[in-house]
Structure formats: C-alpha cells, structure tokens
Image (cartoon, helix red, strand yellow):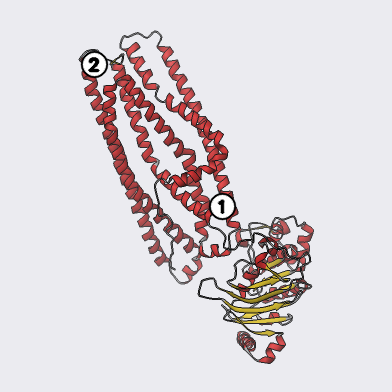
Amino acid sequence: MATQVHEDEVLGKAYDARLMRRLFHYVGPYKRKVAAAIVMIVGMSYLATLPPQFTQRVIDDYIAPRKLDGLWVVLVLYLGVLVVSFALRYGQTYLMQVVGQRVMYDLRKEMFSHLQYQSLSYFDRTPVGRLMSRITNDVDALNEFLSQAMVTILGDALVLVFILINLFFLNWRLALVVLAMLPVMIGVTAIFQKYTRSSYRATRVSLGRINGFLQENISGMSVEQVFNQEQRQYEKFDKLNTDYYKANLQGLLAFSTFFPAVNIVTTTTTALLIYFGAQQIYGGPISVGGTVLSAGLLVAFFQYTERAFTPIRDLAEKYNTLQAAMAASERIFQLLDTKPTVQDPTSPTSLPDNVLGSIKFDHVSFAYVPGEPVLRDLSFAVQGGQSVAIVGATGAGKSSIISLLNRFYDIQLGCILVDGVDISQVKQSDLRRHIGMVLQDPVLFSGTIADNIRLLSDIPIERVKQAAEYVNAANFIERLPGQYEYMVKERGANLSVGQRQLLTFARALAHNPDVLLVLDEATSSVDTETEGLIQDALTKLMSGRTSIIIAHRLSTIRNVDKIIVLHKGRLVEEGTHDELLAKQGYYYRLYQLQYREQEAAVA
C-alpha cells in the first residue's frame, strides 16, 4: 500500500498583511470586546513597569537609611498593583478567549456550510482527511494566535516601550548600555527564528505523512493482515516516525541553544550595568536629570533589564504560533475561495408544480477529466411514470447518468431535460427535491434508526414506520433493542449490509419524492433473501413514479418498461427484456454470460 501525502504544510510568508486583514474581518463583530481587552493590555503593560520603582524606593528610602517607618505604605501600594494587574489580566484573557472561541465558531460554521454546497468534483480531488484538518487543526491554530499570541505580541511590545522610557527617565547613561545590547538580543532572536522556521516546516510535513499513513493503514488493516504485511508496514512506519523524531530534535536543538544565548546576553548586560553603575555611585553622587544614581536605582535597572529582554524572548517563542496562523489562514481562505463548479443560474427556471417525470438526454457528452469522455453523444428519453433500467459493463457510464441527472456535475455538450426544462436552468435544490436516491454503498449516520430514515426532518414517526414496513425493514427493526430508537454506530457499523440498504430504501420512500426515484445498483451488495425483500418493495415503490434502475444482476430488471444498454459511453441497444434477448445483441451476450456464471456458481 503506497502512501500518498499531499505536502500542504509548505509555508508562505511568516507574516502576510493581506491574510491578517482578512482574518481580522472575522474579529470585526467583536471589536468592542477586543477594544476593551486592548485597554486592559495597555494598563497591564504599564503596571508591569512599576515593581522595579517600588524596589528602588524600598532600598533607597527604607533599607539603606535603616528606616522602616512607612514601609508598609509601599508594600500596600505594591500589593494593590499586583491585585489590579491580576484583575486586568483576568479580564483581557477572558475577553480574548471569548473572541477566539467566537471566531472559531463562525469560521467552522462558514467552512462547513461552504463544503455542503461544493460540487462533488471538489471532493473527488480533495482527501477527506485534509478537509477535516482545515476545520479542526487550522481553525485551532488561528484561535491560539487570536486568543494568546496576538495578546502576547501587543503586550510585550508595549512593555518594552514603557521600560525603555523609564530607563531613559531614570538614567540615560545606563539606559544607553541596555539599548546597546538590544541589537545583540534581536540578532540572536533572528537566527533562532530562521532555524525554527525550517524545523517547524519539517516537523509539520513529517507529522502529515504519519497521519496519512496511519489513516490509510488502519482503514486497510484487514488487507494488511490477510497478506501478512504487518512487518513491512511496521518498517514503513518506523521510517516515518524516525523522520518526525529527527525533525523534532532539530527544533529542540534550536530552543536549547537559544535560551542559553539569551541568558548570556542578559548576564553580559547586567555585568556592564554593574561596572558603569558602580563607577557612578562610588565616583560620587551624579545627578542626571534631577535623579541621583543610587544602589536602589541600580537594582531597579537590573530588574528593568531582565524585563526588557523577556518580551523579545517571548516574541521569539510566539514566532511559530504566528507562522502556523499564517499558514492556517492561507489554507482556510483557499478553501473558502474555491467556488463550486456547478452553480445555480442567476435567473432560474422553476419546474412545473405537477412534475410528470419525463427525462430526456439530448446528445449529451461528459468527461470527468478533459479529453477522457465517459458519455459520448448520448441520447435517450424516458416517459413520465416509466421504469427504466440502465445496464452495461463496468465503466460504461451508468452511474454517471445518475450523477448528471442530479446535476452533481455539469455536462460539456448537449442538454438534459426534465419535463421539457433544461436542468442547468433549474436551482439544484428545486431539482433534487423531486429525486429520491438509493446508492450502492448505503450511507448511514450516527443516531437512531428513526433519525436515519427521516434525516432529522419533520417527517412524523408514523410515516417512518410505514416506510419501513413497505420496504420490509420493520421486521429486523422491531427485533432491535429500542426498535426505532436503536442507536446506529458510525457508518452503520452495527448493522449488516442488507439492513443498511433496507434503511436507505425506507429513507427514500419516507421522503416521498414527487416523481423521480433513482436507484443506483442498490441490490448488488445484498444476499438473495434480502434481495427478494427489496424486489417486493420495489414493485410498490416504483408504482406511479419514473424509476431509473442501475443493476449488475440482469435477472432483477426483467419487468421494467425499458432497458437501455450502454457500451463505452454510447447507447448501443434499448427495448424490453424479451425484445433485447430476441435481438441476440450486446444485452443478450451480457445476459448469457451472467446466466452461465450463475450456473457455475450453483454447480
């Protein structure tokens, strides 16, 4: 099993103003909360610069002269600053977390709605795992940036500005010493960011490969075990795991180097402050801007220096968060900017109130991939109320007819008419309202039996039960614990294939499509007994409705009004079962082949 991984973790700019403006569009509805949080951040940043000033006063006014009277006033003020800082931090954290959660809620809702109206061609070329990653991981990355990193970046920038102002106000000579070391700290941070950027990319790509391999491997576990591939798959995983391990080690090396380098710069700055500060103190009281350099002021400078370098260090740590947010934004907006290939007309035509269900394919040509046609100049007509079967070898284009009739895809040439109306001129929802569809692979959802039949619409339980009885599903439903309230597991894992198929028949009947009932190989995956139950239900279900049946088992379509035979996307024969057998053409050969296979199976 080859693992195909889409390398969608490749990073663009570390900061993209265009993406940031678009992201803040989602913050707009909560601008009052954001404004309040910003005011609190400004207050917090200012209050963060006050403790060193309290330290200076305690040393110079009380400890050095050995006077403790009035010390409690400074301590109370210090405690008050801490309490107010706590309140401001609590308020801004709460507000920004609320904003982050609201933006996540809005984005996920918009993305899910956008995906619901995407054309099927988009899902044909886009892996499900990648879409899930967009709605979960990428949105979480944006939330972390909005609720934490953005606040940290703004707060740290303000703290740095306030500290530099205080330093120059206290002693401009010593402030220049600190300022001279700032470029060194910024340079160390820039080197760190360069290495963490490449490390981050390698880590994300390696993690994506592991996730893709695990999803594929676990889904195909039965095949792996049948062919004794456990050791081979283990070796593949071990290689992917080793790559991820090495990528993480690269990031750890960068972090383990960065923080000691920061400590060296901080310690060097402190040593320079001690040297120049001691000269000023012991050289005699030096008045700078009306301020006498003292031991307390020097200690305050030590504290300010530590606090000045902390924001730069924090900004470096938040660099990966900013980078992840930019990459996530780009991927999310790329998804939201993808327009459906099948769109409703600007001035749609409505189908008649009483749809008869006549269908006409008029010289229809269609290809999923340009240059590789699936249907070639196909023309046929179905009268309202007729039952029609479409047969042919695998790849003849049978299922494509069903998809085109539902307008899951747009044709390249020709037109498809329902009651004389071109379906390309009809709203998709209006068209599909008249179509009931049962697929070969029954799709069920987590929830009760009743919810899976009604699909959470307003269909009453009496109609649900009536539909189940019509398609012979009531017999097994009433034997289940809870009956119609029985909980179906994900994808109907606790039901047999036949039971799941019967439920999809009940679903189609419960929604009572006005005219069209389209059945796509719905009996090909069930046993003979269940097929008999379905055939009995079909007789009732198709009565008075236009019905299109696609079936591999030709024995199940003997009684339809017309059979359309396809070969390589072209109509080669049409007529009743007996008429086609009498022609001894393509249908006759298909029927004889199946008949001999059935005889061989019985023998």
- Mark 2, Cα crowd under 10 Å, few <14 / some 14-19 / many 20+, is some
Residue that appears at 27% across and 32% down: 181
Q: Front-most of 448 and 30?
A: 30
Q: Report the amino acid beneath label 1.
A: Met
Q: Which residue is mark 1?
A: 111
Instruction: Decide if residue 223 is in sight here.
Output: yes
> How far from the left and from the top, in percent, is residue 337?
52, 54
Residue that appears at 36% across and 26% down: 163
> How far from the left and from the top, in percent, is residue 145?
46, 42
Q: Is residue 6 left or right of residue 279?
A: right
Q: Is residue 320 above or below residue 176?
A: below
> How far from the left and from the top, in percent, is residue 246?
33, 53
Q: Front-most of 367 and 234?
A: 367
Q: Is residue 221 above or below residue 391?
A: above
> How far from the left and from the top, in percent, is residue 480?
70, 61
Q: Which residue is mark 2?
A: 281
Q: Is residue 179 above or below residue 556?
A: above
Determine the secondary structure under disc 1: helix
Circle number at residue 205: none
Q: CA distance from mark 2 to mark 1?
A: 64 Å
Determine the secondary structure under disc 2: helix
Q: Report the amino acid beneath label 2.
A: Ile
Callout 2 touching callout 1 (CB < 8 Å): no
Q: Is residue 252 left or right of residue 561?
A: left
User: Closer to us: mark 2 or mark 1?
Assistant: 1
Q: Classify residue 542 by image quadrant.
A: bottom right
Residue that appears at 43% across and 32% down: 155
First-in-chain label (2 vs 1): 1
Seen as rendered, the residue at the extreme front is: 347
